[in-house]
Amino acid sequence: MTRILHISDLHLEDGFPGVPWTSFANKRLMGLANLQLRRRRLFARASQKVDALADFVRDQSVDLVVCTGDYTALGTHAEIAYARRVIEPLTHAPLGFFTVPGNHDLYLEDTVRAGWFDDHFGEFLRTDLPECAVDGPWPQVRLPVDGLALIAVNSARPNPKPSFSNGRIPDAQLDALARILDDRRVRDRFIMIATHYAPRLESGRADRHHHGLENADAFLQISCAAQRGLILHGHVHWRYRVRVAESRLPLFCAGSTTHEGREGLWVFDVEEHRTVATPGRWDQSRYVLESDQASEIVG
Ligand SMILES: [Fe+2]
C-alpha cells in the first residue's frame, strides 16, 4: 500500500522584507489591502499548521505528499522564499514531494519573469518522463511505485486584471497529457492527475468564469482516457469530492489546509486493486483523519 497526503492553498506569509514599494504599484496593492483587512487573520496560524502537518506525515506513515499550489499570498520573492522554508519538513516523505504552483505563486508577470517559484520550488518540478514534457517541466510525471502514476499539469498563470483569478492549462500540456495517458508505461497504473484549479465545484457545476479553469471541459474530456484514478486540485477553499458526468475520474479538492475554520486534506491509500480516500481536518492542535468518512474509489 502507498499512502499519499494531498494538501493545498497553504497561503504562507510573514511580511514583505526587502520587497520594493514598486512591487505594489499594481494589482498587489489591492491584494495587500485585502491581506491586511481580512486574509491575514484567516491564515495567522498557517505556519504552525504546516509544522503539525509534518507531525501528521510522520505519525500517519505518509509515503508521499502532494500540494496543489498557492503557497503564498501575493507571489513576492520574500513570500516564496519564506514558504519554501516553512514547508521543508513536508518534503522528506519516503517517496517525495509532488507539486504545482497556484495562481498566488505566479501572481503577476514580475514573479514569472524573475523565476522566483522555479528558483525555490524547482527541485520538486522534476519528471520521470522528460521526453513527455512540452512546456518547461510540464506535464510532470512521477512513477513512484509499481501501479501508480502521478501527473501534474500547470493551470496557474499571472492575472494582472484586478477582479480576475482564473486559470488555463496550456493546449500543448493538454495534448501531452493525452499522449501520457496512452503511454504503455503509464496507462495501466492508478493515475492521479494534479492541477491547481478546480475543474468543477462541489455542486458539479463549472466555477465562475473569472475564478475558474477556462478549459476545464477539455481537461475533463482528456482525463477520461485514464481507466482508473482521480483528479486532485485546490483553489476553492472548501474540502470536497465530487463525481461529474464529464469524467470517469472523481475530483478531490483539498480546499485550503490552513484556512481558519475550513482546514482540509485528503489521504489516499493506494493498493493494487483498490484505493481508499479518507478526509482529514484540523482539531485545533493537530490534523486528524475522519476515518468514518472514508470511501473506496471504484473504477
Ligand atoms: Fe488559487
Image (spheres, rainbow, N blue to C red):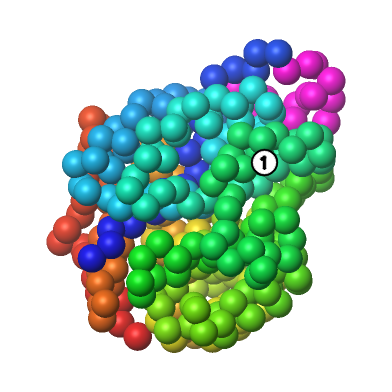
Residue 15 occupies quadrant = top right
Residue at image x 68%, y 65%? Answer: 133
* Residue 28 falls within the magenta-colored stretch: yes
Chief SS of the magenta region: helix
* Residue 139 falls within the magenta-colored stretch: no
Image position, residue 88 (x, y; %):
44, 32
User: From which residue to which does the magenta span run?
Assistant: 19-37
Q: Position of 187 compared to 289: left or right?
A: right
Q: 186 or 246, which is in the foreground?
A: 186
Count of number-bearing discs: 1
- At label 1, the amino acid type is Asp
> In this orientation, does residue 85 appear?
yes
Q: Position of 175 compared to 263: left or right?
A: right
Image position, residue 107 (x, y; %):
71, 40
Residue 183 vertical placement versus 45 (above, below):
below
Q: Quadrant of the C terminus?
A: bottom left
Residue labelled with disc 1: 118
Residue at image x 30%, y 52%? Answer: 63
Q: Position of 219 compared to 44: left or right?
A: right
> In this orientation, does residue 217 appear?
no
Residue at image x 25%, y 35%? Answer: 55
Give the SS element for disc 1: helix
Residue 214 occupies quadrant = bottom right
